[in-house]
Image: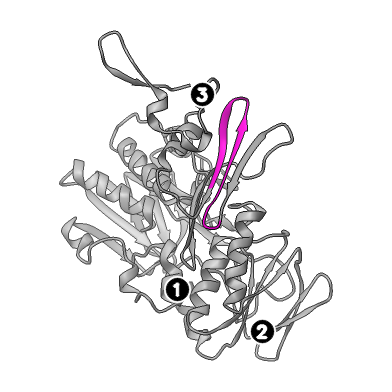
Amino acid sequence: MGYVILGVGAAGITAAKTIRKAEKEAEITMISTDRQVHSRCMLHKYLSHERTAEKLSFVPEDFFETNRIHWIKGKTVTGLDTAKKKVILEDGGEVPYDKLLIATGAESFIPPVGNLREAANVFGLRHLHDAEAIDKMAESAEQIVIIGSGLVGLDAAYGLMETGKKVSIVEMADQILPIQLDKTGALEYQKRFEAADASFYLGRKAAETKMDENGRITEVILDNGESLPCDMVIVAAGVRSATAGLDGEGIVVDRGMKVNDYLQTGAADVYAAGDVTGLSGIWPNAQKQGETAALNMMGGNVEYEDRFAIKNTINFFGLVSLCVGLIVPETTDVVIAREDASNYKRVIIRGGKVVGVLLQGDISHAGIWQYLIKNEISISGIEKDIFDLNFGDFYGIRDNGEYTWRTA
């Protein structure tokens, strides 16, 4: 059996490990545009010079040799022939497969604003080659505009500020980290960034740019007419599934690559996992998808069930936050918040069930919240302080003395 895996991220690497563990003699080929395995979650560590490119890898140096995996690195797949079961590389080469896994991830979305898409000094931050290009230009760039204040945007800002760069961050929402935190939690990070000399332009959009004769943007003009001088622009305004060139017969793309409950695409023997599917944007889920797809490629019949992906951990300037579930409450929800000098906690309750929690400061013993939210466990009838809940409040004992966890 010949397995081909496109992409060496969390989903692709996990799939390769799963296949090799079960099938010692199978032929496994991995193809990637990337020339080095790396964790995209750690790219800001490269910008801050805390880690070298090699230290961003999440597999052993001899991973491919030890697992007898043929890695075609630095090559982009530009075509897919699902009828003849082969992938076509940018240099015209062809790689046949018996089973194919598409785990190409996602690409930064550059909005069609001014010259953002064609300028030579505009970057996303999704891959190691993005970080390398940013770091090289940062050698001479002093003023940097970052569009977007989500985790990627603030990661980029934090990394560059560590090397002494001046950053200006533009965010269309009226707070930073609008998807991850409420205004109270976000303000604590904003204060810390501003104290370190970052500038924020909230409730503003990039509306136009000015580009010089060298093809570099020198000013980003906001929707209120304000101009931000810059030497470089980093765009962190969302991602799009990396599906370019992967439109073979039976493949359906609608935001993400469409798959069924077994992570099969509409093409025979072609599966997809990770960010390319649009199912989840968090690392553990991508790994689980890679494992599930691999098991099914080997003849299994395993459904992918863990689609819960609303979880983020944030750590800037030593302040840690954990958010699970929903952040924005509806008018009929019950919101309970508690704040002191070092901690902020907020819970959203809907219909007697916890649907969202935000912990900032001390996030210990947080596992109970993911259990309650993910499994939609009712807390009705429990009279103790909600912030003192623990797993002991949600188990019972069967007639035979066996412990049983509440599942609804």
Give the residue number, with chain letter if any, for mark 1.
Answer: 129
Q: Where is residue 401 shown, x and y percent of the image? A: 26, 13
Number of other residues with Cα within 10 Å of mark 1, as a class: few under 14, some 14 to 19, many 20 or more: some
Name the kind of residue labelled 3 in the image: Ile
Secondary element at image label 1: helix
Q: Which mark is residue 382?
A: 3
Q: Residue furthest right?
A: 224
Res. 307 in view = no
Of labels 3 and 2, the one closer to you: 3
How many numbered marks appear?
Answer: 3
- Circle nearer the N terminus (3, 2): 2
Mark 1 and mark 2 in contact (Cβ < 8 Å)? no
Q: Where is residue 395 shown, x and y percent of the image? A: 37, 22
Q: Residue, x 53% and y 79% (percent of image)?
A: 161
- Circle nearer the N terminus (2, 1): 1
Distance between mark 3 and mark 1 Cα atoms:
52 Å
Q: Is residue 378 left or right of residue 182?
A: left
Q: Which mark is residue 230?
A: 2
Name the kind of residue labelled 2 in the image: Cys
Q: Residue furthest top?
A: 399
